[in-house]
Image (cartoon, rainbow, N blue to C red):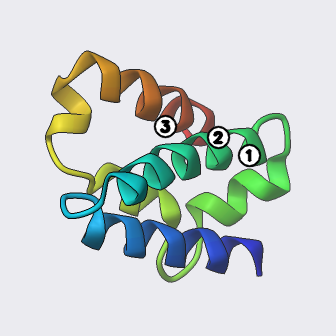
Amino acid sequence: MFAEVLNFTLKYCYVFKDKDKEAEDLLHETIVLIGYYALHNEVSNKIMTKGENPILVKLCGLPINYFKDKRLMDILFPTLIILS
């Protein structure tokens, strides 16, 4: 259930991040929350990486800025490392 809430939040934030600063901030906080949720918890980690529409795939599909901009990399990469 929690994974579905995170999934919906990621979708929402991705759509509105360019139009609304609060949606962009929520996206960043959600990325961090996903990392903390999966940290040192194998079951939670599997929930984020397995299934029909894994959250890990959504994170890897974020705009290229998240892989080039140092500030955005600092938000995304720790979570990606935790989920890998």
Quick one: SS at disc 2? helix
- Name above or below for residue 62 compared with residue 15: above
- Name above or below for residue 38 compared with residue 56: above
Disc with the residue nearer the chain's start (2 vs 3): 2
- Work out which quarter of the rendered image holds the N terminus and state it: bottom right
Instruction: Check disc 2 and give the amino acid type.
Output: Gly
Quick one: SS at disc 1? helix
Which residue is under mark 2?
Answer: 35
Which residue is under mark 1?
Answer: 38
Q: Residues within 10 Å of mark 2 (few under 14, many from 20)?
A: many
Which residue is under mark 3?
Answer: 80
Instruction: Tell me which residue sits at (60%, 68%) in the image.
Output: 6
Front in this rendered view, residue 28 or 78: 28
Instruction: Tell me which residue sits at (84%, 35%) in the image.
Output: 40
Disc with the residue nearer the chain's start (1 vs 3): 1
Relative placement, left or right, of 10 versus 3 is: left
- Work out which quarter of the rendered image holds the C terminus and state it: top right
- Name above or below for residue 18 compared with residue 5: above
